[in-house]
């Protein structure tokens, strides 16, 4: 059996703070925050072609910005009202393939993504009124209807918890720290993430098994002080994880 290798292995100048997937174009969007430089940048990667569409994209406000969602070839970004509040304001739309601005509106704010398009509202009007907008132009399409404009749920699978006694055979020699094991089965593969201790120091590992053989393993983090959240997600056949919070790894299963 041939050992698995990442189809994408890419480092960024900062911590990957958030990821989202545009399912229409199979594009992975990332928000990268560099606290030392107080810079927030954005990147987009085409998963089927393992190609970086763009990276190091910044807005004129280089720190108080973030990512809302990616859908139908468009990445929606936002500003923060101030550094002391999590309240979002303004919308800027970016083409996920070209990394160019499509439109922006500083009076609108994002509420959620529906099957009809993004649901936005005008922050200058009270009470708040929700409208569905065209994601590529920013134009209002219609008032939001909770019944017909249901929330769009993306096909992103997160791991489940696995009891230590059910740890697959090749890994049974390991002693999971805190008993926390994350697990997914997909296409005949079993993906496992767990923590171990090395001289009292916590480490986080990723293992991919096939036919009770380890076909991929990666030390994702070491020298950490506490148990980390799940180390990976799965979208279709793409296993997506982060190494040291700054390096993206994608395997095709």
Image (tube, rainbow, N blue to C red):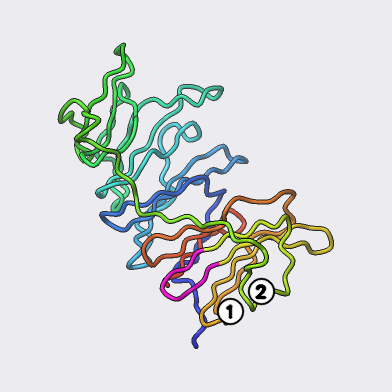
Asked if the residues shown at circle 2 and circle 1 are in contact, with their CB atoms under 8 angstroms apart, the answer is yes
- Write down the region rendered in magenta: 184-191
Query: Circle 2 sits in a helix, a strand or a loop, which is it?
Result: helix
Give the left or right position of residue 181, taking residue 3 as reference: right
CA distance for labels 2 and 1? 9 Å
Q: Which residue is drawn at 29% across and 46% down?
A: 71
Quick check: 92 above or below 27? above
Q: Earlier in the sequence, mark 2 or mark 1?
A: 2
Task: Give the percent coordinates (x, y) of residue 64.
Answer: 49, 31
Query: Circle 1 sits in a helix, a strand or a loop, which is it?
Result: strand
Task: Give the percent coordinates (x, y) of residue 211.
Answer: 52, 82
Task: Give the percent coordinates (x, y) of residue 3.
Answer: 52, 82
Give the left or right position of residue 64, taking residue 199 as reference: left
Quick check: 15 above or below 8? above
Q: Which residue is drawn at 61% across and 69% down?
A: 218
Single out the mark in the foreground, 2 or 1.
Answer: 2
How many tags in the picture? 2
Q: Which residue is drawn at 15% across and 28% down?
A: 142
Q: Quadrant where the C terminus lies?
A: bottom left
The secondary structure making up most of the magenta span is: strand
In the rendered image, residue 188 lying in the magenta stretch gets the answer: yes
Instruction: Find disc 1 in the rendering and name its residue.
Output: 214
Residue at the top extreme, as displayed: 126
Task: Give the percent coordinates (x, y) of residue 28.
Answer: 38, 55
Residue at the bottom extreme, as displayed: 1
In the rendered image, residue 217 lying in the magenta stretch gets the answer: no
Instruction: Find disc 2 in the rendering and name its residue.
Output: 171
Mark carried by residue 60: none
Query: Could you say which quadrant of the image residue 116 lies in?
Result: top left
């Amino acid at each position: 059996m041939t050992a698995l290798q990442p189809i994408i292995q890419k480092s960024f100048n900062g911590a990957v703070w958030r990821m989202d997937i545009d399912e229409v174009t199979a594009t992975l969007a990332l928000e990268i925050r560099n606290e030392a430089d107080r810079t927030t940048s954005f990147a987009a990667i085409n998963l089927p072609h393992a190609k970086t569409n763009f990276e190091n994209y910044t807005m004129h406000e280089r720190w108080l910005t973030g990512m809302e969602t990616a859908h139908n070839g468009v990445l929606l970004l936002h500003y923060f009202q101030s550094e002391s509040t999590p309240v979002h304001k303004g919308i800027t739309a970016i083409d996920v393939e070209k990394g160019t601005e499509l439109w922006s509106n500083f009076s609108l704010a994002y509420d959620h993504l529906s099957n009809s398009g993004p649901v936005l509202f005008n922050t200058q009007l009270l009470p708040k009124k929700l409208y569905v907008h065209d994601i590529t132009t920013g134009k209002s399409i219609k008032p939001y209807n909770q019944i017909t404009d249901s929330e769009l749920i993306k096909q992103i699978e997160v791991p489940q918890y696995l009891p230590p006694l059910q740890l697959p055979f090749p890994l049974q020699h390991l002693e999971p720290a805190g008993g926390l094991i994350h697990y997914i089965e997909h296409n005949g593969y079993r993906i496992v993430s767990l923590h171990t201790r090395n001289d009292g120091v916590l480490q986080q590992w990723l293992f991919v098994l096939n036919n009770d053989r380890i076909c991929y393993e990666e030390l994702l983090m070491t020298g950490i002080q506490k148990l980390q959240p799940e180390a990976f997600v799965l979208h279709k056949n793409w296993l997506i994880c982060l190494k040291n919070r700054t390096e993206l790894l994608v395997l095709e299963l």
